[in-house]
Image (cartoon, grey):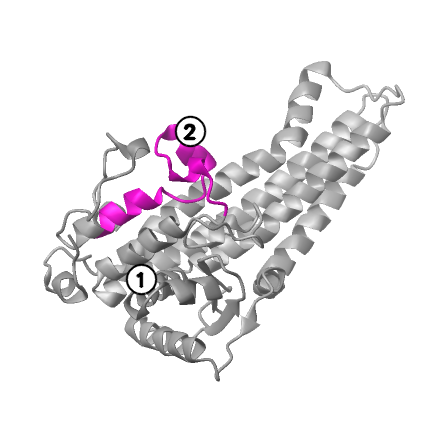
Amino acid sequence: MTFSAEQSRRSGALAPAIDFAARQQRNRRVSVAIVLGFIGFFLLVGFSVDYVYLGAFAPRGPSLPWATLGSLAFATFMTLTAYGAGSKMILSSMNAEPLDRKNPQHRELHNVVTEMALASGSAMPKVYVVYDAAANAFATGRDEKSAAICVTTGLLVLLDREETQGVVAHEMAHIKNNDTVVMMLISILLGGIALLADWAQRSYMGSRSGRKTGANPLLVIPALLLIVLSPLISRLLAMAVSRQRELLADATAVEFTRNPIGLAKALEKIRDAGMPFQKATRGTAHLFIASPFRRRLDERDGRWADLLSTHPPIEQRIQLLHRMAGAAAPMAAPQEFKGTKVQDPPAQRLA
């Protein structure tokens, strides 16, 4: 059973109006909290290095906490870099290129983005493509004026215009909700945490000469655990932030297009294509409309799967979109989703 865009638009179950000003204000607060949290995390790692390895707080006579001060300086540098040049760094890492106006697919993409910018009341973002057979898309930028939408050529080949509109609306939703600055900061700061943890572990390897620092053994173990687990902890926090924003962006996209079926069909095709996006990294996976890794874990539901995935299961998102259109999902769920409880539409649950 299939559903047309016109049936979708006539449905009375579409997403209610979303308070974008409130969402933007909330995300500005989240951005500040993320930056402060990461800076605090950097300081904790630096303090741990000072305490365990360098003996900066030893009873025999404290010295300057060089690792803590260095971590603060590094955190400040990474935050300024993320805010000032994070978008360019992300686009460069993906080998994103501006549209070729001579290409009919690129011209159609530009037209669709223009339509969705008007529908969302946003400034026209820059539009890029990545020449890759995988079907995916992402948005980045610190605000509407500096925002960019990037899609793969594989997505342009796979989707029709209605489906492409759904994907672009999803990315415009991230821009309109100020998700892009949150996710951009997370991408850059995750890389900083990984670098800092690697440096801390190298400091440990370089200090295994048996030199005593006078550190309390009861505090050494938690400090070591913090250093070793810091990349994992920060990544888990990033995943939690990302999952919530994907559901909200789906609901917001419906607000722009009044056509949940278009996005649902796009997600179905992306799911069925199943091709991983090779240029994605663990630090950028949360940016995409669908997980770029195509792992089985990403398509499972449950507490552990949610904890370790950057996106909600695509099947759950598809069923939610069909419920928003007042229609049943057009196909049976795969075996691993049997018995999965479908929650209320995200527009009702998150608005």
Of the pair 35 and 87, the residue shown nearer to us: 87
Side of 33 relative to 327 (left or right): right
Say which mark, if any, is on residue 100: none
Query: Mark 2 or mark 1: which comes first in sequence?
Result: 1
Q: Is residue 226 magenta?
A: no
Residue plotted at (34% across, 55% down)? 269
Total marks placed: 2
The image position of residue 62, as x and y in percent, is 82, 29
Please name the amino acid that badge 2 sits on: Trp
The image position of residue 46, as x and y in percent, is 71, 37
Q: Is residue 249 visible?
A: no
Q: Secondary structure at mark 1?
A: helix
Q: Badge 1: how crowded within 10 Å, few (<14), some, or many (20+)?
A: some
Q: Nearer the viewer, mark 2 or mark 1?
A: 2
Of the pair 200 and 64, the residue shown nearer to us: 200
Residue plotted at (40% across, 35% down)? 306
Q: Is residue 5 visible?
A: yes
* Residue corresponding to mark 2: 304
The image position of residue 163, as x and y in percent, is 31, 64
Of the pair 86 and 295, the residue shown nearer to us: 295
Q: What stretch of residues is rendered in magenta? A: 293-321
Side of 333 relative to 63 (left or right): left
Residue 164 in the image: above or below residue 193: below
* Residue corresponding to mark 1: 20
Residue 3 in the image: above or below residue 302: below
Please name the amino acid that badge 1 sits on: Phe
Residue plotted at (38% across, 29% down)? 303
